[in-house]
Image (spheres, rainbow, N blue to C red):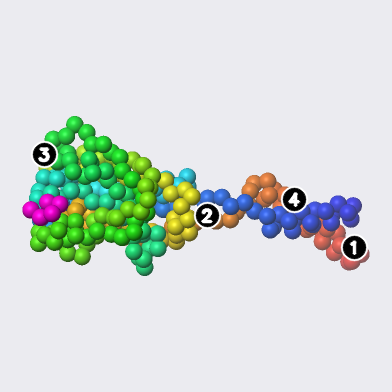
Amino acid sequence: MTLIKNVFKIFAITALFSSANVFAADFLVDTTIDDANNDAVGGWKYEIDKMDVQWASDGLITVDIYTNFVDYNNEYSTGYGNGNIVLGDLLIGTGGASSPFDYAFVLSDADRERTQYYSQDHWNNTGTFTEIGSTVSAKEYHNNSSQVQDGQVVAGNTIGTGQQSAWSVDRQNTGPNRDNYDLISFSFNVNGIDAFQNASQLAFSWAMSCANDVVDGVVSVNRPTSVPEPTTLLLMLIALGFMAKSRKTKANDFSA
């Protein structure tokens, strides 16, 4: 009997130190970055409402941006360099607020240069999620035009080929009162990318190329917590029960 008790004691100690890592939640990130209302330079056509960010446990990141600008992509011109105002890249920083943007979702030229959405049958809806070496400001993109905002980054200079990823548009702002924002949605997978796996915070930024409005912010990453598997937990409970019974028996023997 003493041997059996000792075996269960060993099981209990082992179980206490052997647990499996599992995700305590379905998402590492699930949050909203709000933008101030009525802050767009040039009026409501450039207005951005918010950015929703989700990072699922399977590695898929989805970023949804609500803005009026979809219908006005490539409609207005600054008259300089890359004259027409177009959709910008989604910029991401894996070091949070303390580091520069090092990744981006870069739209294809075919999509970026299409005229306003309502005159098109479709967009290509393809882009590249890639590492970037530097960012491009609105001034740089539009060759120092005086009609764009200074100091705001809107695109990235890519490194390597990256991965082909999907983006889409859901036109919701079609009513007579235009009281809904259109939705631009970016999706890409970061499994196997060390910069993301080691990140405790992520910074995001998006704007149209003139940067008349910008939505940006920093989100925290909720890492997995270590919890016992069900079988390990059951073993612990059984072993601890035997240990408690053993102590009670010893106490009774001593009192006798």
Residues 40 and 84: in front is: 84
Comparing marks 4 and 2, which lies closer to the viewer?
Answer: 2
Disc 3, disc 4: CB below 8 Å?
Answer: no
Label 4, label 2: how far apart the Cα atoms are = 27 Å
Quarter of the figure that contains the C terminus: bottom right
Residue at point 35% right, 42% down? 165
Outermost residue toward the front in this view: 160
Magenta stretch mostly in which secondary structure? Answer: loop
Q: Earlier in the sequence, mark 1 or mark 3?
A: 3
Q: Earlier in the sequence, mark 2 or mark 3?
A: 3
Does the magenta run of residues contain 161? no
Disc 2, disc 1: CB below 8 Å?
Answer: no
Q: Is residue 9 left or right of residue 229?
A: right
Q: Which residue is mark 2?
A: 224
- Give the amino acid at mark 2: Pro
- Give the amino acid at mark 1: Asp
Q: Residues within 10 Å of mark 1 (few under 14, many from 20)?
A: few
Badge 2 marks a residue whose secondary structure is loop
Q: Earlier in the sequence, mark 3 or mark 4?
A: 3
- Give the amino acid at mark 4: Ile
Label 4, label 1: how far apart the Cα atoms are = 23 Å
Q: Which residue is mark 4?
A: 238
Q: Which residue is mark 1?
A: 253
The span shown in magenta is 79-83
Q: Percent from the top left, x then y, of residue 219?
A: 37, 59
Q: Is residue 159 left or right of residue 73?
A: right
